[in-house]
Amino acid sequence: MVDPAILDRLKAIAGPGGWTEDAQELEPHLVEWRGLYRGRTPLLLKPGSVDEVSQILRLCNEARVAVVPQAGNTSLCGASVPDGSGDQVILTLARMNRVREIDAFNATMVAEAGCVLANIHERALAEGRIFPLSFAAEGSAQLGGFLSTNAGGTNVLKYGNARDQVLGLEVVLADGRVWNGLRTLRKDNTGYDLKHLFMGAEGTLGIITAASLKLFPAPRSRVTAFLGVPDVASAIALLSLAREKSGDMVTAFELLPRNGLEMVLRHIEGTRDPLETSHPWYILMELSSGLDQDIVQRLADGILEAAFEAELVRDGTVATSQAQAQALWRLREVMSETQKLEGASIKHDVSVPVSRIPDFMEEGMTAVIARVPGSRPVPFGHVGDGNIHFNISQPVDMEPQAFIDLWEDVNEVVHGIVARHGGSISAEHGIGQLKRDLLPRYKSAVEMELMRQLKRTLDPNGIMNPGKVLSAD
């Protein structure tokens, strides 16, 4: 139990409006987005400044009180909720949501960790720039959270993961010290690049309070196509063709299975099948550029002509308006949530080299169906960068809990195939609690010890998001 006197001191640091212990207000902060994890806390802290974060961590470190940093609470691995002890306080930076600076000529933005991704997009567009990171939870995901998980999304193919779009960080360390690394330089070769320690660390090494972000010119033109393909191998060949013929203008390249599309069409009002005939697989491809629309359109037409000639594509449609493009993207964006309406599902966020995707998909789906007859693999996602959301929906005639009880067995099957193909068991969702105990199986002893040494060095008292990423020594 946390000493009530320490809780009172933490409240005093956060000040009026900077904390709550109201059960109703705490409730949404205690449950992970998918409902897999639920915890308890005596106090939610909502600091409004870096100095307040610093004071809070200094006191918690001295008193050995664990701190769970929480942003938009959209984690899919249980990284952002406390455990069940009731001894961990939650710290959210939602009040620290200012854009401190935009430099259009340097193409940078300095923003605080509580900024919601959608708002970052708006501020960048107002300057004729974009911050290209994009994923379904952008209306609630906060900067500190998606940097701490090194989020990916649909534009990784062209712009890279979150860490590739950051130039500098401001971080409060476990002992309360503040590291101001908010540089906006493209080149800075002065020693270790410390910012990469904290991106992807899921709040276990310190708390990101602000970041210097890369901005890019806003595209003047965009072409969105929805294409039916005969198999996954054809999709990979199409990706190579599109990148070669477009001068690498391919911004997004998403794979959708027929059964996943059918789930969306069954459950989501207002959706419709974009093509007249059904196909085993679909590709949602987007090209974007600063060139004129007619130039990009001609390039897209050339790609599709060559793809049809090579029999890589059987049918397709190209959006003729922004509304049509948004309708096509919606089919992809709601696919994961639609699975909830089909019963229980076992989900995997994995990656393999792009060239190995066809073999991985065939082996994975065959092995899962053999392990759970009647199960429905619904693999989809960012095939352009090798990241597949290898999700499996329960057999229609099976009880949901009976299917969930097979979680570990199915994981072992899928992750084993991923490892054989040189892949990763976590491509963009992180480790959190969900994959913490799996990590030593797929990381070398040297890698695990280096990670533990970093944790001990930066957080010797183990107060930062304990139980996430690494198990207790």
Image: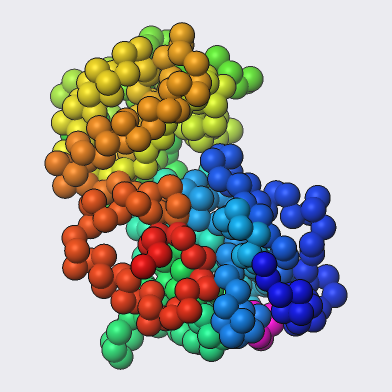
Q: Quadrant of residue 359?
A: top left
Does the magenta-highlighted stretch encompass residue 438? Answer: no
Examine the rendering and report whether any part of residue 184 can be seen.
Answer: no
Which image quadrant: the C terminus? bottom left
User: Can residue 304 be seen by looking at this rendering?
Assistant: yes
Give the camera-side residue of 300 and 383.
383
Q: As drawn, is 462 to the left or to the right of 163?
A: right
Residue 235 vertical placement versus 190 (above, below): above
Image position of 17 with respect to 339: above or below: below
In this picture, which residue range is highlighted in magenta? 48-55
Residue drawn at (49%, 87%), measured in percent from left and top? 179
Residue in view at x 74 percent, y 55 percent: 26
Query: In the image, what residue occupies the spot 50% across and 59% down?
Result: 146
Q: Measured along the vertical axis of the image, is residue 140 above or below residue 373? A: below
Residue 386: percent from left, percent from top = 27, 44
- Residue 240, located in which quarter of the rendered image? top left
Left of 445 or right of it: where is 374?
right
In this rendered view, identify the residue nearer to me: 276 or 404: 404
Magenta stretch secondary structure, dominant: helix
